[in-house]
């Protein structure tokens, strides 16, 4: 991290002692995890403290960590389970996955992470916050609409797609899905083919909803590719071209 980021971290941790836990970020952006009970209070302090002044919320989203870090490739070359991801390739993790038959449930209270990205115009710095909803069955966290008005639509989107409830939101209703839609389509356990399908019924003169008739199936196998673009030791154009020539 740069000196500017470290200086920002020092100010944040001095202002919010005991309320934030710094985590590693691969994007060059300062990231903290906080308790859901501190979500709103921390947001207000970040906005109002004279050494921070995060006046703008530029994004708010939700991440579903269901089976995060546990879903693994079935073979070294491909998997029959369809769209997934490769994770934790070290030997210890592999043995853990084998013992758990390739998949383990996420610990309670660690499934739905609410993430917001903040910008300080005064200090020209950015910050990322994340908090996990304590209840996986009915995820809920305080709304930030009264702190940053831009949170309004972001929170409605997160409610629509992930089912996270924002306590105190003035108008929490679906934003993107159709009227009467059942479920939350960005959850990891939501079926890729959906739950229902619609068609126009000429006899009744209206659109009707029916249980989906598509048979669940995997059409595209996942393949591990050794692509030089993702090699961490390549940092400049010359080494990138050299790796490409070797490939």
Image (cartoon, rainbow, N blue to C red):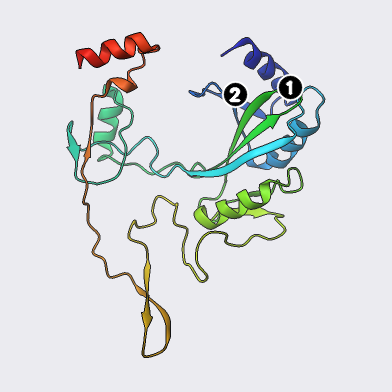
Rendered image: mark on residue 123:
1
- Residue 110, given in percent of the width and then of the height, sits at 50, 41
Count of marks, rendered view? 2
Give neighbour class at mark 2: few <14, some 14-19, many 20+ (Cα, 10 Å).
many
- Residue 206, given in percent of the width and then of the height, sits at 43, 83
Q: Is residue 27 visible?
A: yes
Q: On the image, which quarter does residue 23 sit in? A: top right
- Residue 96, given in percent of the width and then of the height, sits at 29, 31
Give me the residue at 71% from left, 36% from top. 56
Quadrant occupied by the N terminus: top right
- Residue 154, given in percent of the width and then of the height, sits at 61, 49
Give neighbour class at mark 1: few <14, some 14-19, many 20+ (Cα, 10 Å).
few
For mark 1, give the secondary structure: loop
Q: Along the line of sight, which residue is nearer the eye, 121 or 152?
A: 121
Q: On the image, which quarter does residue 210 sit in? A: bottom left
Quadrant occupied by the C terminus: top left
Q: Along the line of sight, which residue is nearer the eye, 176 or 87?
A: 176
* Left or right of 88 on screen, residue 136: right
For mark 2, give the secondary structure: loop
- Indicate whether 38 appears above or below 173: above
Q: Is residue 137 visible?
A: no
Nearest to viewer (mark 1 / mark 2): 1
- Indicate whether 205 appears above or below 182: below
Give me the residue at 69% from left, 38% from top. 38
* Left or right of 169 on screen, residue 198: left
Give me the residue at 68% from left, 14% from top. 7
In the displayed image of the protein, which residue is found farthest to the bottom?
Answer: 203
* Residue occupied by mark 2: 30
Check contact, mark 1 vs mark 2: CB within 8 A. no
């Amino acid at each position: 991290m740069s000196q500017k980021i470290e200086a920002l971290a020092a100010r944040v941790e001095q202002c919010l002692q005991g309320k934030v836990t710094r985590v590693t970020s691969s994007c060059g952006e300062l990231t903290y995890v906080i308790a859901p009970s501190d979500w709103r209070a921390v947001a207000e302090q970040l906005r109002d403290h004279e050494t921070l002044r995060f006046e703008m919320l530029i994004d708010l989203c939700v991440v579903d960590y269901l089976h995060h870090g546990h879903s693994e490739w079935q073979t070294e070359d491909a998997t029959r389970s369809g769209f997934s991801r490769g994770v934790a390739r070290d030997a210890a993790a592999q043995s853990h996955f084998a013992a758990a038959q390739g998949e383990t449930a996420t610990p309670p209270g660690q499934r739905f992470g609410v993430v917001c990205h903040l910008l300080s115009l005064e200090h020209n710095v950015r910050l990322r916050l994340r908090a996990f909803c304590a209840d996986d069955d009915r995820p809920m966290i305080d709304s930030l609409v009264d702190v940053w008005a831009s949170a309004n639509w972001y929170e409605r989107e997160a409610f629509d797609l992930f089912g996270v409830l924002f306590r105190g939101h003035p108008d929490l209703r679906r934003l993107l899905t159709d009227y009467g839609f059942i479920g939350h389509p960005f959850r990891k356990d939501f079926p890729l083919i959906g739950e229902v399908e619609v068609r126009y019924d000429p006899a009744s003169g209206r659109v009707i909803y029916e249980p989906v008739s598509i048979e669940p199936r995997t059409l595209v196998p996942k393949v591990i590719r050794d692509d030089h673009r993702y090699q961490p030791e390549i940092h400049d154009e010359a080494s990138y071209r050299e790796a490409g020539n070797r490939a």
